[in-house]
Amino acid sequence: MENIVDIAKVLSDINRVKILGLLLRNRELCVCEFCDTLNLSQPLVSRHLKQIKASGMINSKQEGKWVVYSLSNTQNSLTKCFLSEIKKSTHDLPSLVSCTR
């Protein structure tokens, strides 16, 4: 039951939903790409990513000096349902502002 609450908390913030949408659309992104694309500060994006990662919805990996985030491959049926709904709205997200990784 705690996992359901964690997922609900993640989905209760529009910026976290946008972050998930960007990952659905672009597969892998670093913090600066979230910041620049969504026009959000790095500390705010990092807090959002930390909460999403704690829910088990995303993974991170180190690539040189960059931390790259992607969706977890181990989604439960509830998470898959929500991600499916978010995916329907990814066309509403701004175009990706890429950084040079």
Image (spheres, rainbow, N blue to C red):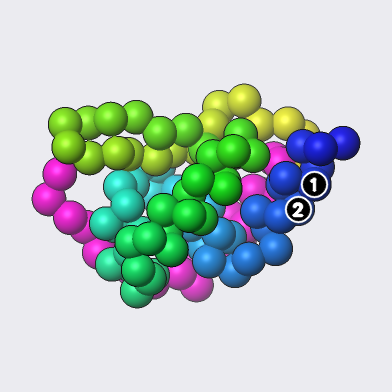
Which segment did they paint magenta? Answer: 79-101
- What residue appears at the point 28 percent right and 30 percent down from the top-left corner? 62
Q: Nearer the viewer, residue 27 or 91?
A: 27
Q: Residues within 10 Å of mark 1 (few under 14, many from 20)?
A: few
Quadrant of the rendered image containing residue 61? top left
Give the SS element for disc 2. Answer: helix
Residue 31 on image: x %, y %:
32, 52
Q: Nearer the viewer, residue 2 or 80?
A: 2
Q: Answer left or right for 22 relative to 99.
A: right
Q: Which residue is mark 2?
A: 8
Q: Circle 1 — which element? A: helix
| Residue 40 visible in the displayed image | yes
Name the kind of residue labelled 1 in the image: Val
On the question of residue 22 being in view, the answer is no
Q: Is residue 61 magenta?
A: no
Residue bearing the label numbered 1:
5
Residue 15 drawn above or below residue 75:
below
Kind of residue at disc 2: Ala
| Quadrant where the C terminus is found in the figure | top left
Question: Is residue 93 found inside the magenta-colored segment of the image?
Answer: yes
Residue 32's quadrant in the figure? bottom left
Q: Which mark is residue 69?
A: none
Looking at the rendered structure, the number of numbered marks drawn on it comes to 2
Q: Is residue 94 above or below residue 27?
A: below
Q: Position of residue 71 (x, y in %)?
A: 50, 38
Q: Are marks 2 and 1 in contact (CB under 8 Å)?
A: yes
Residue 10 rendering spot, x and y as whole percentages: 65, 53
Question: Residue at 80% across / 47% down in the picture?
Answer: 5
